[in-house]
Image: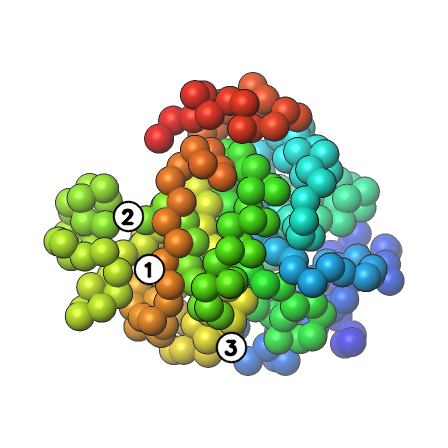
Amino acid sequence: MCECKKLGPFLQKHVYVNFIFYRLSDIVWLSKSFVHDDCLQLYWRTRDMPPLSVLVGIMITAQVTQQHRDNIRLTLTNSKCSCDIKALFFAGSSGDFAQENSAHKDIVQLSFSETMNGGKTYRWFAFANALQTSGVHEFEAVFKMDADTSVDWCGLCNVVAESKNGGPHYYIGRLNDHDNCGEMPLCPPINCSGFSQGCWVYMSGGMYGMSSLSLKKIMRHRYPRDHAVGHEDIQVGLWFKHALPSVALVNIDNGIIWCHNGAFHKQYPTQNIRHHWLQCVK
């Protein structure tokens, strides 16, 4: 525990047992150029956890409405799955979520500007890694998810469990090679399907994740810290190329376990998304 001197007014007045604070100086791998908070607010509820748990960071901005977040919360609440899924909404400095967060305690807001490809993905994975390296909780896998993605949460549990059985290091998502990236100069090299012989690929931004052991190894490497800004999903693929090229790739097409489609979640906020895959835009 530490004393946080520059907390916002809400946090100064409301201190909960399940709020844990760490000084940024204690988290040496987190670049000061990316995060300016004196303390990271790590949310966790105390309870006995099942053997397998998954952490999902849902990227939001001030433009994402509370109703939309409530819809996502409801789909997760209504899912009775074989693993425990902890979903956190992750935001930069835009927006005021204090009142909502006092009720749900599932919004993480750090002091950085919301800019396209400005390092938000790196900040999320660094934050998630902090939850584990600090001993707050150990997850089997950590995911990044866009707010306009709908998820079959129990299907996600099954994919993680199967991936875990294949080995400690895995990278899950919809695989993008040179062709389906758009054949641009920033795309993976031609004829690449993995990370061997100078090749690399990456996973689509709607939803992707990795094992916690993979995340720990990546965050110990210098390359991700030096390459946090840029086309962020592509950057994650390059992190693996430089830090963990031996990772196992788990390719899940859009529309199998999750659906990346903004209109879809608004149409079917509380129903099992397996019934509505025809609404999914691939």
**On the picture, is 83 further left or further right than 64?**
right
Measure the alpha-carbon separation of dots 2 and 1.
9 Å
| Camera sees residue 35 | no
The earlier-in-sequence mark between 1 and 3 is 3
Whether the residues at callouts 2 and 1 have beta carbons within 8 Å, the answer is yes
- Amino acid carrying label 3: it is Trp
In this figure, which residue is indicated by the disc labeled 1? 237
Q: Considering only vertical position in the picture, is 157 above or below 239?
A: above
111 with respect to 282 (left or right): right
C-alpha distance separating marks 1 and 3:
20 Å
Q: Is residue 218 above or below residue 124?
A: below
- Residue at x 46%, y 25% (from the top left corner): 277
Q: Mark 1, residues whose alpha carbon is within 10 Å: few (<14), some, or many (≥20)?
A: many
- Considering depth in this image, is 37 or 84 the residue closer to the camera? 84
Residue placed under numbered mark 3 in the picture? 29
Please provide percent x and percent y for residue 37: 62, 65
Which residue, given by chain and number where applicable, does mark 2 sit on? 176
Q: Nearer the viewer, residue 256 or 199?
A: 256
Tell me, yes or no, if residue 157 can be seen here: yes
Q: Nearer the viewer, residue 35 or 53?
A: 53
Side of 146 relative to 11 (left or right): left
Mark in the foreground, 1 or 3: 1
Residue 251 in the image: x percent, y percent?
37, 49
Separation of marks 2 and 3 at Cα, in angstroms: 29 Å
